[in-house]
Image (cartoon, rainbow, N blue to C red):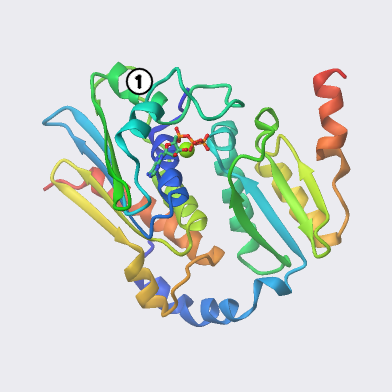
């Protein structure tokens, strides 16, 4: 059972987390949530990312953006590091989102097999 | 094709956030007596003039060249009409917009309700500085959620914290289910 009482218990920890500035985080994780993203299954992806970052073990923020301009590759997740370098992950599902958090955010290694550069060629037969 | 009603509603909410709304009122009303479902989103965003409304509800016009399926407002208008309901946009430039979709409830083509808790969680995450109200009504039973109340209890004005968002999702789903099964 969830109740408003839960929020009172969460107050102190939430306020403490709010004091930490987002700019101190190592990564920015951005999910495309326009019509194309939502229709392709971005809702459960965002859900999983928010769920797994709650404990604070990953140094990243999770945000939404509109259409990334590659609708046929949705759901898309972009990861920006502190230098602004972008990695684009395509056809992401909740399980892949979890792997991206563990490997890219957690260990600092790009999950090459899910990136746009490695997938698009095969899928498009180019 | 729209997967569920929560998806349609979320898209309308995302439009309100994109339109710079500060206050967004969301309603999901089910009536067995009237045999209908009403989805409504009211915002105080930038609004649209009559010409824009005409344009965005016309299925043959789209501002986007990349969209492969006909989702968006024109699609929802078509969906309501297919389900013997109605679709209406009331808007005033600089004041805000109300989008209202109605659908016949006992219709085999009616999409399922979908995850309304997840929908609100995503809405709050998308517009962390907006105030949202969400009303779910099932016949005479009713549940109201208000982000102002959450912010008051947490004594913070931003509720983008993941733990809070997950709580919102679970709380709303629990209350929606309770409202559906409440016998008055
Ligand atoms: N609540 C609103 N307030 C103001 N303008 C709106 C609102 N909802 C829709 N519009 C206008 O109608 C247009 C069409 O909306 P629609 O959702 O069909 O497509 P989109 O938002 O442009 O694209 P997408 O949803 O794929 O990102 C918007 O671009 C916007 O100009
Ligand atoms: Mg839209």
Residue A76, position as x, y percentages in the image: 69, 40
> B88 above or below A76?
above
Quarter of the render that holds ligand 1:
top left
Residue beneath the point at 33% across and 68% down: B148
Subunit of label 1: B
Residue carrying label 1: B78
Q: Residue at x 47, y 57 (%)?
A: B127
Residue B41 in view, yes or no: no
| 10 Å crowding of disc 1: few (<14), some (14-19), many (20+) | some
Q: Where is residue A110 in the image (x, y as percent from the top left)?
A: 86, 50
Camera sees residue B155 = yes
Q: Is residue B31 above or below residue B58?
A: below
Left or right: B169 in relation to B183: right
The quadrant holding residue A22 is bottom right
Residue B23 image-quadrant placement: bottom left
Measuring 58% from the left and 35% from the top, which residue is drawn there? Answer: A41
Tell me if A119 is positioned left or right of A45 in this view.
Answer: right
């Amino acid at each position: 059972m969830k109740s408003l009482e839960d929020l009172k218990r969460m107050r102190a920890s939430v306020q403490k987390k709010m004091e930490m500035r987002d700019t101190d985080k190592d990564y920015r994780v951005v999910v495309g949530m326009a019509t194309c993203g939502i229709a392709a299954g971005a809702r459960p992806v965002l859900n999983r990312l928010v769920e797994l970052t709650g404990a604070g073990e990953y140094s990243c923020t999770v945000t939404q953006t509109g259409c990334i301009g590659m609708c046929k590759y949705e759901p898309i997740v972009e990861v920006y590091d502190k230098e602004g370098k972008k990695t684009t992950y395509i056809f992401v599902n909740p399980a892949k989102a979890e792997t991206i958090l563990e490997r890219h955010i957690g260990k600092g290694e790009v999950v090459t097999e899910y990136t746009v550069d490695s997938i698009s060629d095969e899928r498009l037969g180019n | 094709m729209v997967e569920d009603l929560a998806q349609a509603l979320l898209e309308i909410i995302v439009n309100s956030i994109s339109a710079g709304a500060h206050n967004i009122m969301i309603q999901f009303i089910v009536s067995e007596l009237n045999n209908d479902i009403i989805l409504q989103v009211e915002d105080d965003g930038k609004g649209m003039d009559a010409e824009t409304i005409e344009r965005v509800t016309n299925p043959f016009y789209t501002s986007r060249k990349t969209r492969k399926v006909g989702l968006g407002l024109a699609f929802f208008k078509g969906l309501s009409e297919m389900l013997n309901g109605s679709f209406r946009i009331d808007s005033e430039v600089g004041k805000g917009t109300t989008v209202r979709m109605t659908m016949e409830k006992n219709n085999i083509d009616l999409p399922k309700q979908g995850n309304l808790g997840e929908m609100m969680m995503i809405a709050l995450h998308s517009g962390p500085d907006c105030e949202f109200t969400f009303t779910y009504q099932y016949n005479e039973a009713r549940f109201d959620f208000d982000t102002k109340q959450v912010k008051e209890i947490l004594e913070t004005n931003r509720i983008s914290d993941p733990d809070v968002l997950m709580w919102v999702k679970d709380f709303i789903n629990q209350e929606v289910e309770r409202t559906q099964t409440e016998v008055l």
